[in-house]
Image (spheres, helix red, strand yellow):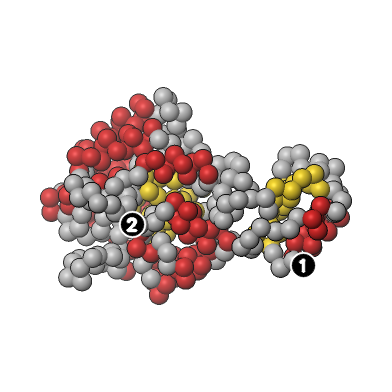
Amino acid sequence: MLIVMRNDATDQQIDLVMAKIKNKGFTPLPLPGTQRTAIGVVGNESRIDSSEFEILEGIKEIIHVSKPYKLAGREFFRNDTIINVEGVSIGGRNFTVIAGPCSVESREQIIKTAELVKISGAGLLRGGAFKPRTGPYSFQGLGKKGLEYLKEAKKISGMPIVTELMHLKYLDLVMEYADVIQIGARNMQNYDLLQELGAIKKPVLLKRGMAATMEEFLLAAEYILNGGNKNVILCERGIRTFERSTRNTLDLSIVSLIRELSHLPVIVDPSHGTGRRSLVAPMSFASMACGASGLMLEVHPDPKNAVSDAAQSITPEEFAEIMSKLKSMAMIFDKICP
């Protein structure tokens, strides 16, 4: 429920409405506007009887919010959320590209990649120090050493770091090095982890689960927002369908729909979404066209010898070409692409 106050409502009247909400066992969420204040009601699982509020003074109207993802939805927050990561803006008209290897393999590899993608226009550097792999015998990442290499790459390139958190036991360690904490598809519904991330202030990049509906995706974001962390970036990375010619089915329609229903920035990962190097470029261009706030691309200086995701990693040269074309497209789609 959203309670819209009159533009001449007094502070006392607003306080009384908020006290009434608390007395009902719900949480009031003040939403100050340029002309009037609105108060969101959070914590209800079913429709609230508004008759007890209608008798209070200073109320202009009461709007019943139909969506369960109240904090992630546009019914409470009309304007796009823009997240600032050490001077890099994500959301709104900005089209921000996160680039780097799937896994941090060595100091030389991550530093070389960082320098090259920076030149081409990447805003943030990605790299996995801890890697969730389907098989237990696959490369699992360098752990803390990988984080140290990322820190050095950041110092040299100036780019903020995006890296994945797999388990709560690594939270403090990853917090020490990461500027954006990535939650992978396998952990999208790890609610204990999401609740802990709600208590921090660092931006969280939340990837859509392999079988998650849009509502489940936004409700996962709601866990983080409800904890007090407003810096959530959504990432469409493809879902698992009956199609086997691509690694996943990249669902770009969901990007446009989320832009309608949510104020949160949503980026696209065409590398995981397709699993094919040849499809990364066209899906990157399509992502800008459908309204995405940016991309997350796997770039490796020597993809043939990458220890993970070799088939979907692009070279720095291919990345430079993609960035050049995206910059040309930006004016057509009213985007700002550095």
- Which percent across, then down, holds residue 83? 51, 47
In the shown orientation, is residue 142 left or right of residue 91?
left
Q: Is residue 288 visible?
A: yes
For the C terminus, which image quadrant? top left
Residue appearing at x 36%, y 38% in the figure: 287
Residue most extreme to the left: 304
Q: Is residue 82 visible?
A: no
The residue carrying mark 2 is 210
Q: CA distance from mark 1 to mark 2?
A: 40 Å
- Which percent across, then down, holds residue 168? 42, 72
- Nearest the eye: 209 or 114: 209
- Nearest the eye: 220 or 166: 220
- Which percent across, then down, holds residue 68? 56, 56
Residue appearing at x 24%, y 51% in the figure: 242
The residue carrying mark 1 is 23
Q: Amino acid at mark 1?
A: Asn
Query: Helix, strand, or loop for circle 2?
Result: loop
Q: Amino acid at mark 2?
A: Met
- Nearest the eye: 234 or 175: 234
